[in-house]
Amino acid sequence: MAISKKAFDAEAAAAMTAELRAAFGAGKTRSYEWRVAQLNAIAKMMEDREREIVDALRSDLGKPEFESVLYEIGTVKNSCKHTLKELKQWMKPEKAGTPFVIFPSSGEIVSEPFGLVLIISPWNYPLSLALDPVIGAIAAGNTVVLKPSEIAPATSAFLAKHVEKYLDSSAVRVVEGGVPETSALLEQKWDKIFYTGNGRVGRIIMAAAAKHLTPVVLELGGKSPVIVDSDVDLKVAVRRIIIGKWGLNNGQTCVAADYIITTRDFAPKLVNALKHQLEKFYGKDPLESKDLSRVVNSNHFDRLSKILDEEKVSGKIIHGGHRNRDQLKIAPTILLDVPEDSLIMNEEIFGPLLPILLVDRLEESFDLILSRPKPLAAYVFTNNQSLKEKFVLNISAGGIVINDIAVHLTVPTLPFGGVGESGIGAYHGKLSFDAFSHKKAVLYRGFKADAALRYPPYTAWNLSLLKALMSGSLVSIINMLLGWSKNTVAKPKVA
Amino acid sequence: MHSNPSSMEQTAIAELNSTFISGATRTFQWRETQLKSLLRLLTEKEADCFHALYQDLGKSKLEAFKDEVGPLKKSIDYTLTHLKGWMSPKKAGINLLFFPAKGKTMPEPYGVVLVIAAWNLPLNLALEPLIGAIAAGNVVVLKPSELAPATSSLLAELIPQYLDIKAIKIVEGGVDVSQQLLQRKWDKIFYTGSARVGKIILAEAAKHLTPVALELGGKSPAIFDFQSLSSNVEVAVKRVASGKWGTLVGQACLAIDYLLVEEKFASALIDMLTKTIKKFYGESLNKFSRVASKRQLDRLQKLLKDPAVADNIVYGGSVDKDALILEPTILLNPPLDADVMTEEIFGPILPIITLNNISESIGFINSRPKPLVIYGFTNNKTLKRSILNGTSSGGVLFNDVLLHFLCDELPFGGVGSSGMGRYHGKYSFDTFSHEKAVLDAGYLVELEARYPPWNSFKMAFVRTAYKLDYIGLLLLLIGLKRYPKVHKD
């Protein structure tokens, strides 16, 4: 029986944030024990509910169980585990040295939660990109509202059903919905907003956040380029590129290989190797393969079709291209030598289409990449040390991987975040904790030494001594005090 | 004024762009040269700096050195000492599973950055961020505050003489110039000033997804636990006085805005404060720094004109309109909804709010926007802990005022409406850098399990690998570990 739910409007959003503020104010989320309990609950949810999650992901995206286990459930579990292991250390204040001029004193940096956090997650990894930030927010001691993507409805429903059951619902809530619900949420004052998605919506969110001076993390995307050099072990490189494109939610991943750049000379070999391995991975008829996600919905299917059908590009298809709209499937498709002003080269593809751009010399690829917005990731396949170094030095991106694709996401010691159009802020590992913490500077002073020189009335003597002290040079201080410095001015007699 | 500011600006920014692309600012040598030149500027032109600050704000030489020039020189020295280390990549530990991959993070400059400075520390708040931007290898447009015109002119004159004009540009002007500048896309914006303008800047930055650091203000309270201070109370009072009237008579984001004290100690405190003021400044008004402008003086007087507030003046209130001086003024329990208790005062007025018990100060502060700093004057460990863990602010200082501003190892910045982002020391370098992740994967070990077509073995492998269960992996590989069958539907 369908029960009509009351719409989640601004009033509901205000009520929810008021409740969570009260919970935060009461100190619920501050203790180490509370945070550990929540993280354990998330890990347990993954263990208990694996079957349901795999089914939800299959329903939403046709995601193969392998990808669900590796990239969704596995990521969340590992994140919990890593956080639980390190949390006590992360929560400790960090000692900070203090300068001589204010001796005696001691300093420290204390991590404290921002308070009320809003997390808006995308549809392509609807479980891990929802829960991974939640893990960070909770680890840092915040209260959280999670708004999962409505474009992955089965996973959204799963989260709505289980998160508040497993976790402390007085501090962690899930709000399902689309634009109206998100807008209602964005009208409220948050202490931090964490958004994963695209640049268009990222701007809207940042503008909404600006009204309340709310800091944001925006994990966006871009066109992640892959430069392929001719000196590589072709089989290995090609296999990694393939799973770095079609093995990542069928290309619907922010760090998927978006397009390839290689030399005219090398291209035929590369293309052959790609075709060969693609068949090995996905069979002769990839539309039948169980190891590929489908395109998420008809909107995106039509978008991708439009890209493929563009006149200047449709003749460049050298592999694949077949589609099935009912099943929302597009075969792994390779395009060769597409023009730079085509649709496919001017938006993030986010699908199973791989254009290959050709240059005469590999060095030319740098200009190609640098003339475009900074991507979330950039890749180079080469054994040439000099090319590697040049690439790392000159290409600005969120992250760079040499000789593989996307694997940096699984390393908790590496920041995951963009720059420029690809985003603001970063997370993963300790950075998740940091992203949701305010680092408060604390200075302790005692009363033992109180320098009269600090207080008015001021004289030239005060100034000279202050200068000497600030220079930190023991010699200048002694010189000053003993009257040997040319800056010395006689200390006035105090009445 | 320029006849066509917009097109001059365009040329300037085009030049900055090409300088950045050329890689000139990426070398350690370039950054070091700029910073050393800046240091020379502050040494050679110290007298000019003092003069400009005196013209703009009536700042005494000591205050000019203590609050502006001195900290800048210290920051440059600190940066020069540590810069090489900050610039070098940092290794990131990679677990065995990825052997022989190597991971690291590398800082890189954002590119073309905009720094907008405030008027009350017009030299320091312009150059301190500049130090960070240069250290991080960016090219910079610096817009000093038009409300401190002598300093702005001085910077416009001296910076091109000492620094690389192809990489660092000064743009002078007021609101209209700022608005124009904000229309373009910057790679980072660093703003010091008010929350009102901070929101405008953030909204403009949102259009371009530009990351922003906002150093704002707020009402920074002092919690005065008279009882626990016991014999230290005199020194504490001196520090309070200097934390209010010692920095441009309270025109500082870090000034004590208002003070909380227990009712029974209020009159003793007021008595001690007034004695201290007289000792520091004498009886006549002319020893005080002046209020920055007539507009500011009018604003401050207006705060006092509120009849409900005027009734609560227990000391001071006199004004010398021509000299732009407002006497240190103490209010006792003005109404909490009066402007003087809801707006950042930024002047020599000190409201004292009394409480029954000093522990109530936590709740009082928490019901208000998060301040830039909370000053806790107390020897009571429990109260210290309550303040530390029970309130939120940019920073906390115990038993003194302002000094954390001088600490290179402490992040300086606000939270909530007092700001976002931080700087000073390495934080300045970081705030102007993008920390790029770099992973160099190896070819040595090829994990077959990564590749489709996927099957039960590969699934088991991946699960085991994810647990970093190396023994389990070994057992799997040599066939000694059982695994469940996986259905592909």
Image (cartoon, coloured by chain):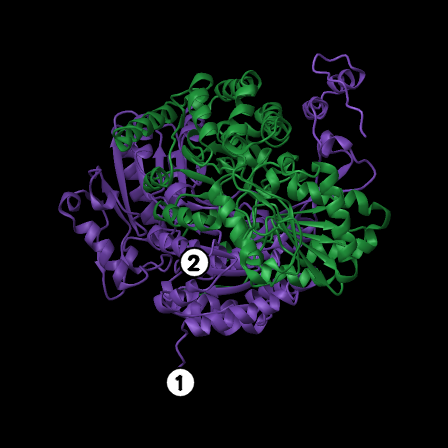
Q: Mark 1, chain letter?
A: A
- The kind of residue tagged 2 is Tyr
Q: Residue furthest right?
A: B231
To which residue does mark 1 refer?
A: A3
- Which element is circle 1 on? loop
Q: Residue at x 65, y 66 (%)?
A: A28
The hue in which chain B appears in the rendered picture of the protein: green
Question: If you read the primary sequence from the N terminus, does the residue marked by circle 1 or circle 2 appear first?
Answer: 1
State the residue lying farthest toward the bottom. A1
What percent of the width, then of the height, locates residue B211? 44, 43
In this picture, is B223 found above or below B213? below
Circle 2 residues within 10 Å: few <14, some 14–19, many ≥20:
many
Residue that badge 2 annotates: A125
Circle 1 crowding by C-alpha within 10 Å: few under 14, some 14–19, many from 20: few
Residue B47 visible at all: yes
Residue depicted at x 36% and y 57%: A292
Q: CA distance from mark 1 to mark 2?
A: 29 Å
Q: Nearer the viewer, residue B449 or B260?
A: B260
The chain assigned the colour purple in the figure is A
Residue A380 x %, y %: 40, 34
Does B227 sit above or below residue B40? below
Mark closer to the observer (1, 2): 1
Q: Secondary structure at mark 2?
A: loop
Residue A14, percent across and down? 47, 70
Quadrant including the N terminus of chain A: bottom left
Residue A61 in the figure: left or right of residue B151: left
Q: Are marks 1 and 2 on the same chain?
A: yes
| Closer-to-camera residue (B375/A395) | B375
The C terminus of chain A lies in which quarter of the figure? top right
